[in-house]
Structure formats: structure tokens, C-alpha cells
Amino acid sequence: MGKKCCVYGCTSGYASNPKKVTMYRFPKDNEQRKQWLRSIPNKLSEEEITDHMTVCALHFRPDTLFSTGGRYQVPLEPPSVFPNVPSSCCGTPQPKPRTTQSSSGSRTDITVVDEHKTVRQKDTLFINTFFSCLSEKISHLGFVAHDDKNIVIFSKQREGPIPSFSLYLSISDVVDGVINEVKFQAYKKLVFLQHKQLCGIISCWSQFDELIRFVLDDENEVKNEEKFKFVARQIELLNTPKNSKIYNTDDFLLAFSWYSKSRSLYDHVRTFLHLPSISTLRKLTSLAKSVSDEILYQSYFKNVEDKCRGCILIIDEIYVKASITYKGGVLFGYSMDQPGQEEKLLAKWSDLKDLCNSESQSLVKLSKLSTSTISPSNIEKQKVSLALNVFCEQTSSALKTSSHRSSSWSETAAFIDIVVSLWKAFNTKSIFQATRLCDPDRQVIDSTPAGERILNLLHQWAQLAQSMSPRKVRERALTRDTSEAMSWTCRCLADLARYLLQTEKS
């Protein structure tokens, strides 16, 4: 949708007026915007002005000065020509310069303005002289071919049939003989170049000169040569049989850099590029174990300049079990902060079966366990109510107080208490629930010590869920995905709650 003039009575930009006129937005400077509001006849406030409201060029005097910087020209004076509006409704126009004898300072200002106007005049793209001026600027660099709106520029220097650079220009906006917009595409040896500031559009000769400097820059040529080498190497590997590919050092360096950032990224890249497999990279990394640290460091710094060899080695002493192995960049096992003091909590499902069997022969039943709870079918395993019959305070109390209890029942009861506390933290739905039920585990998460205890509980559960992932093949434990999902859920929930509490305080 085209822009429309917001001045009262003006039809520029509307369907009833097909004539194309340049539109100017309101200035962002507060003082200049107030001058515009005082000049136009509309009764508008500063709050009503949006970034899409414009005033057409018909409301500016022919001798209006324009700024030269930026992508578009901006009027330096407010609009003052309103032919369809009575003079009594117009704002106070800008005072005209005095014709009396001026001082030296004012003469200097007039001279500067005249110089700016001359520079802007030379920098403007006029349609009648555009092609001739373009040929003069490019005559020592390349050849120009054009029609009414499209221009193609090729450099004189070539590498075989490929020119060192090429430009494709397209005139897209011409108003009153002035070119306001020229779209371009630049190539360096058939590789597309993107200028971050120009964004594919030029509107004056100074921007065209900047485009030529950018195309002739040697840094772009170095980047293009690296791209060409990479493409040539991929074509070479493409023509090599699958089982006889031999990768060089550059291939492995590129592969290690991508693999170290993201394994999923590397898997995706290998679907359309020829790179070493992940198993090959792991074999290479595992070879570092057989090399001494001194030889390994010497190989790292062998080709590094002296000024780049300064480094700091930070050693964090941790205890690692003897069964833990390191191969191919993957650590199997986990570290311990306090060696020899690892506390394990062993919960057995058989304890629940024994409790249910003992209560089936008793007149008083302390737990909610039943045959469906202990031995559920495939469909019954989906019921949350059966899971709550196991993880509840009644089952924990029955394990602790039953006369038939064994030594392992206390650990099973302790594990059920931990799960129940997490369940309560997740299902607290009212700020009065902890007081009404006299249960501190129902406390909402806030900045009080009781709320801080719930946050610590979530962090403890995050560590516990991570430790419950399987470390051996066919080990009875949570699946790796389940343990990771549970650990990150608890950790993110606690961190998000802390952030919200800190934001509320600040």
C-alpha cells in the first residue's frame, strides 16, 4: 500500500490522483516536528503522529534545503505551501531571510549552505545524465551494458572466462527526473557479496562509490578463495568412492570445529557434505590418552607465534572412580565431591509387595496398596491414581510402623517421602494450602525461608534425577531421556522462580 499525504485537502498518494509525488516523513527531532505541526493546517498533536504519516513534496517551496546524509533526503524546513487551504487556517510560515546588509557570520552560513547545495546537486542521480556519468566512473575498471532501466557492469580483469567482479543494477524509482532508488547485486568471481550498510539499494553517487570500494576490497577476495577451496575439495570427495575417501588436515580441523559446537549440527551437515564420521573423530580423540602431556602441549604450541603462547592452566581436583573411562571425548561415569562418603538410597518394589501381602492378612490396613497397585496391567499402568496409592504418606507410614517390616523398608519409605515432597511442591495451588493442611511441603515459592526451602528441594531433585540415569547396559534405572527431562524441569523451574523473585524485588 502506497503512502498518502496527511495534509488536509491534499490527494497525493490516493487513487483519485495518479500523479507520483515524493513523500517525506515527519522528522524525529522534537523541535523540528513541532515546527511541522505548527505549519500544516491539520490540528494534530505529537502523540497522533506515527512513523507512516507523510507530507508530499507539493507543500514545500522549490528553494527548500535538504539534508545530504543518510539514505533519503530530508527537508530542513517545514512545509509552507498549502494551495487548497485558506491562509487563515495555515500555521505561521518560516520567516524569509532579510534582504538588508548581513554580518560576516550570516554570510558564512549562506556560503556553507550554498556549498552543501552544490554537493547535493552533484551527488544526486539524474536520469538524463546517469548512464554517461556511470560510464565515466567505470571506464578504467570495466565495461557497461544497459537498456532503459537495467545496467550490467563487468570488470576488465578476468581469470579465464570469469570476471573478477560484476554488478547488476536496476532503476526502480524515478520521480521528476531524479532517481531515488537503484537496486543492485554484486558478485566477486561469481560469488555473491552482501553489503551490510547499503542493503542492496543505492540512492546517490557517494553510495555507488562506496559499493565500488567494497567490491574491490581484497579481504572479500581472500574469503572467496577459501570458499572456492572448500567447494573444490567437496567436489573431489564427491568423485571418490565411499570406502576409499582420505581426509586431509583441513577436513579434520573443520570437522572438529563443527563437532565441538554441536553434535546434532554435525550430523545434519554430514547429510549433504562429505566429512569424517563421528566414530572416526572419536578414535582420533582417544589417541591423546597414549601421548604424554608434555608432547601434547608441544604439538599444540608448535606453530603458534610467541605473542600467542601465553596461557593459564586451571586444574580442578576431583575424585573420579576407578571404573570410569574416557574415550572419544565422552566421559562414562561421574565425579564425587567427597570420595568415600557416597550415600546410596535403595528402594525396592518387593518391599511394597511384602507390605501388601502382610496387610491382606490383617484386620487393619494402613496403606492404600492393592493387587492392582502392586501388579498393574498394561492399561492400569497409565492411571495416575494407582501411582498416587504408592507415593503417598500412608504408604510411607505403613512401611515405617508395620510389625512385619524388614531392614530395607526404611530406605523405601525414605524414597517415597522424597517423591511425595516433590509432588506436593508441583501441585501447590493456593497460598493458604500450607496453613490449612498444616503441611510445610505445600508452601508456595516466595522470598521467605519456607519458599527458599522449596527452591533447594527442586535443585536437590534435579541432581537426584540426573544420578538415576543408567550407567550400565540393561541397568534398572530411569531412561536417559526421562532423567534428563526431569532434571532440567526441576532446575529450570527453580531458576525461573529465583529470577522472577529478584525481578519483583528490583
Image (cartoon, rainbow, N blue to C red):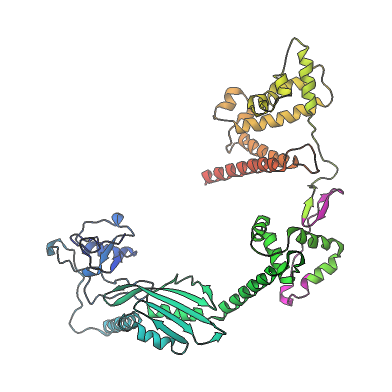
Whole-percent x, y for residue 215 in the image? 50, 79
Q: Is residue 433 visible?
A: yes
- Within the magenta stretch, is there residue 305? yes
Range of residues picked out in magenta: 300-329
Q: In front here: 14 or 157?
A: 157
Q: Main secondary structure of the magenta part?
A: loop
Work out whether 402 lies above or below 12: above
Residue at point 30% right, 54% down? 47
Q: Quadrant of the N terminus?
A: bottom left
Whole-percent x, y for residue 224 in the image? 59, 76
Work out whether 14 lies above or below 21: above
Image quadrant where residue 475 sits:
top right
Residue at point 68% right, 56% down? 263
Would residue 306 appear left or right of 119 to someone viewing this image? right
- Within the magenta stretch, is there residue 10? no
Whole-percent x, y for residue 249 in the image? 74, 71
Would residue 202 appear left or right of 312 to someone viewing this image? left
